Image (spheres, rainbow, N blue to C red):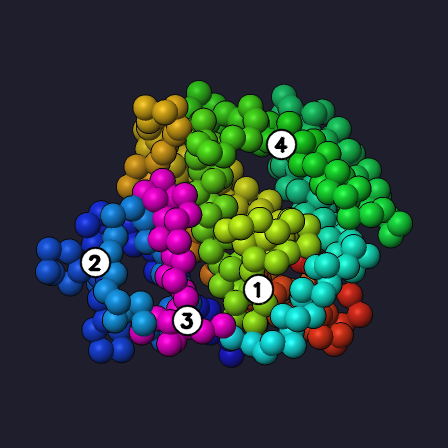
């Protein structure tokens, strides 16, 4: 039986996290709002003005529960974690592969195959659901382009060429992303990807979901003993979890993008929940964030059959399973890394 570890999201401004026996207590004005046993948690994410006691942080570190701090609108600030798990031999092999252009290309090719295929599946599902929609022809063309980019991932292509293919595929996908939005077009429209800051409601929603996914991928990599900072597709950069960003690529379209589209198209989230700041950036209010967090956690609890392992699992455990498969490949238990293909 697999235990699905949950993430505790703290969005209440002015909240304070404290150790209460074998539990995490969320307090405000010296009143305990929530008490969560530590063994049920896989991570804690704090948004905005949320504090934590040193004893609570040490407690979480001992139990392998990472605590992340983000701004109120979801920009990553810092992460507190305990001793690194896993053995040094695995990380040394990770670093060797990352420094080897040919080995890097092999893993990058697998990651991109899943990313592009999963993005194309999102488009194909939209075409199946709305074959006569106004943007159907644009979606069909995009699906063809993504198929061509998939075919371009040939073994002889070097890693820089693979990164160029990824850029072409992402451009084709986001050029038709607005066609996937079927409701509330006045408040939710997509022209281009904007990040820091997000310049419209859709980008604000996507950035928030990507932040949540990044947290889950970092936790998954740490849990198997891999270094989230040293990746293959993403180059090393101070402060950037490159391997976590690599792992995210397999799930962006499946988990984050599809959830954003569902929230908009089912009108579970409204334009009134977004505001534009003085700098032009768009942020979600507390109620909108809570709606997204509840939907994200609910989505993670859905069950699927893992295409490579052939076992039933929850969507929330997919990053952990993929991290474990990557570790097995680096240890030479698997000839290649089997990325996650969504069916």
Nearest to viewer (mark 3 / mark 2): 3
Residue located farthest toward the left when viewing the structure as drawn: 30
Could you tell me how far apart the alpha carbons at marks 3 and 2 are, in whole angstroms? 20 Å
Where residue 147 sits in the image (x, y, percent)? 79, 40
Judged from the image, the secondary structure of the residue bearing numbered disc 3 is: loop
- Residue 188 visible: yes
* Sequence order check, earlier mark of 1 and 2: 2
| Mark 4 crowd level (few <14, some 14–19, many ≥20, 10 Å Cα) | some
Disc 2 target residue: 16
**Point 35% across, 53% down: residue:** 69
Residue hosting label 4? 174
Residue 269 percent location from the top left of the image: 38, 36
- Label 3 to label 4: alpha-carbon separation: 38 Å
Foreground label between 3 and 4: 3
Q: Judge from the rendering whether residue 165 lies leftward or rightward of residue 10; answer left or right.
A: right
Q: Is residue 338 magenta?
A: no
Compared to residue 90, the image places residue 275 above or below, namely above
Depth check, mark 1 against mark 2: the one in front is 1
For mark 2, does the 10 Å Cα neighbourhood hold few (<14), some (14 to 19), or many (20 or more) residues?
A: many
Disc number lying in front (2 or 4): 2
Q: Which residue is mark 3?
A: 82
- As measured in the structure, the alpha-carbon distance from the residue carrying label 1 to the one carrying label 3 is 14 Å
Q: Which residues are magenta?
A: 59-84
Q: Is residue 74 above or below residue 318?
A: above
Residue sitting at 68 percent across and 50 percent down? 233
Q: Nearer the viewer, residue 59 or 92?
A: 92
301 or 9, nearer to the observer: 9
Q: Which residue is mark 1?
A: 227
* Separation of marks 1 and 2 at Cα, in angstroms: 30 Å
Q: Is disc 1 in contact with disc 4, using a CB cutoff of under 8 Å?
A: no
């Amino acid at each position: 039986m697999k235990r699905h570890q949950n993430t505790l999201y703290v969005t209440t401004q002015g909240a304070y996290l404290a150790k209460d026996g074998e539990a995490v207590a969320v307090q405000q004005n010296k009143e305990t709002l929530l008490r969560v046993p530590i063994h049920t948690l896989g991570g804690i994410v704090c948004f905005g003005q949320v504090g934590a006691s040193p004893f609570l942080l040490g407690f979480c570190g001992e139990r392998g529960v990472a605590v992340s701090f983000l701004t109120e609108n979801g920009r990553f600030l810092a992460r507190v974690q305990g001793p690194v798990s896993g053995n040094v031999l695995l990380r040394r092999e990770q670093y060797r592969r990352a420094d080897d252009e040919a080995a890097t290309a092999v893993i990058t090719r697998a990651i991109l195959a899943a990313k592009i295929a999963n993005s194309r599946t999102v488009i194909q599902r939209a075409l199946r659901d709305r074959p006569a929609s106004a943007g159907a022809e644009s979606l069909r063309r995009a699906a063809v382009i993504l198929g061509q980019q998939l075919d371009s991932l040939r073994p002889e292509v070097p890693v820089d060429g693979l990164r160029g293919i990824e850029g072409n595929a992402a451009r084709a996908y986001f050029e038709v992303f607005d066609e996937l939005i079927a409701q509330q077009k006045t408040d939710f429209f997509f022209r281009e990807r904007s990040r820091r800051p997000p310049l419209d409601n859709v980008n604000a929603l996507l950035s928030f979901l990507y932040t949540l996914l990044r947290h889950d991928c970092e936790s998954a990599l740490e849990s198997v003993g891999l270094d989230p900072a040293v990746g293959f597709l993403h180059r090393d950069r101070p402060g950037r979890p490159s391997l976590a960003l690599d792992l995210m690529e397999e799930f962006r379209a499946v988990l984050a993008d599809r959830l954003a589209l569902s929230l908009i198209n089912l009108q579970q989230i409204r334009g009134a929940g977004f505001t534009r700041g003085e700098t032009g950036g768009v942020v979600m209010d507390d109620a909108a964030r809570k709606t997204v967090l509840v939907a994200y956690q609910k989505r993670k609890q859905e069950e699927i059959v893992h295409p490579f392992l052939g076992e039933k699992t929850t969507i929330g455990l997919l990053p952990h399973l993929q991290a474990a498969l990557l570790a097995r490949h680096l240890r030479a238990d698997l000839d290649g890394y089997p990325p996650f293909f969504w069916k």
